[in-house]
Image: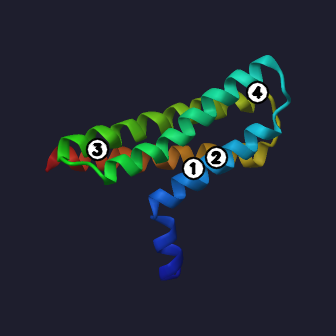
Amino acid sequence: MTEIENTKRYDLEERTFQFAKRVIALVNLLFKTLANIEIGKQLVRSSGSVGANYIEANESLSKKDFFMRVRICHKEAKESRYWLKLVAAMKEDENERDSLVNEATEFMRIFGSIVEQSRKS
């Protein structure tokens, strides 16, 4: 992996932005049923919240505020994964959905690790 690829991989502000953008594109592909509309709303909110709270964490005024925001990132990534798994039952775009579930899982691990490291310091 080149240095540019490595930097891009760990630029969480950009990565969480791209995640939310991809989720919106996936939701736009869903058939417009009542269930899909409601699931889509929840999924768009939670996926966007991952990045929004990460930006807030980076601007935090204290360790306690940082820790709280990162915990919210973790929670929202977990919620996004839940909604993406519900989309799985509809079998829309399986490849993109699976890729997004993996990305949400990685965010959970990343933010969970940050929470653990913050507790130790």
**Real-space CA distance between mark 1 and mark 3, rounded to the nearest whole angstrom:** 18 Å
Residue depicted at 60% across the width and 55% down the height:
18
* Residue at the disc numbered 3: 115
**Real-space CA distance between mark 4 and mark 2, rounded to the nearest whole angstrom:** 15 Å
The numbered mark, 2 or 3, whose residue comes first in the sequence reads 2
Residue 41 place in picture, x, y as percent: 65, 28
Outermost residue toward the top?
34
* Residue at the disc numbered 4: 89
Amino acid tagged 4: Ala
Q: Please say if the residues under marks 3 and 4 sit with CB atoms less than 8 Å apart.
A: no
Report whether 60 appears left or right of 107: left
Amino acid tagged 1: Glu
Q: Please say if the residues under marks 4 and 2 sit with CB atoms less than 8 Å apart.
A: no
**Real-space CA distance between mark 4 and mark 1, rounded to the nearest whole angstrom:** 19 Å
Colouring of the image: rainbow
| Mark 4 secondary-structure assignment | loop
